[in-house]
Amino acid sequence: MIHSIHVYTKAENTKSKYILKSCSAEYEPLNQKARTSDEIPLYVCSLPPAVKAIDERKPNLCLVNARRNYLSGLFFPHAENPFLGYGDIGNDGILVSMRETGFLEVIVFPESKHLCMALYTLFADHDRDLLDEIQAHRKAMQETKGQG
């Protein structure tokens, strides 16, 4: 069910820029290189005024890639999990986990836009099957990183 997991760290002395550190598989919208470096940045920004909310859902933040393309609105629906959210990129659903330490993780679920809230709920409720699948991807990512 998971396509890929992307792990970013916050760039120093920036407000919204995160740099890709590892991923379990390439996903074109999230793997855009910067024009002036080999970095693969992702920006977590306040919602631009031009983006209209659908069905009265108002995203808290948005994701923007290196080419300054708006990727997704990010929803953080529960105060008890303020760093756990969801969104969608095209027809794909995403879960987002942010930490105050400058860590950002984006989990991509292909063709699951319609399941974003359900996936968020499973993740927030620590669903064993979903967490096992996430851990398997994280482990594969670590093994690949160790070989390179």
Image: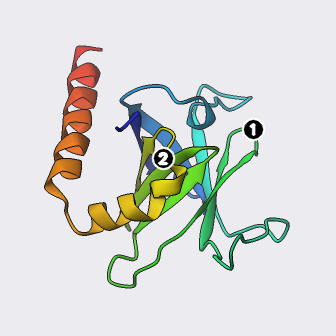
- Residue nearest the viewer, comparing 14 with 80: 80
Q: Which mark is residue 1?
A: none
Name which residue lies at 57% across and 34% down.
40
Going by the numbered disc 2, the residue's amino acid type is Ser
Above or below 57: residue 33? above
SS at circle 2 = loop
Q: Residue 111, position in %: x, y?
A: 51, 40
State left or right for residue 49 relative to residue 92: right
State left or right for residue 18 relative to residue 127: right
**Cα distance between the residues tagged 2 and 1:** 24 Å
Q: Are dots 2 and 1 in contact, CB under 8 Å?
A: no
* Sequence-first disc among 2 and 1: 1
Going by the numbered disc 1, the residue's amino acid type is Arg
Q: Residue 80, position in %: x, y?
A: 32, 83
Farthest right residue in view: 50
Residue position marked by numbered label 2 in the rendering: 112
Q: Which mark is residue 67?
A: 1
Q: Which quadrant is home to the N terminus? A: top left
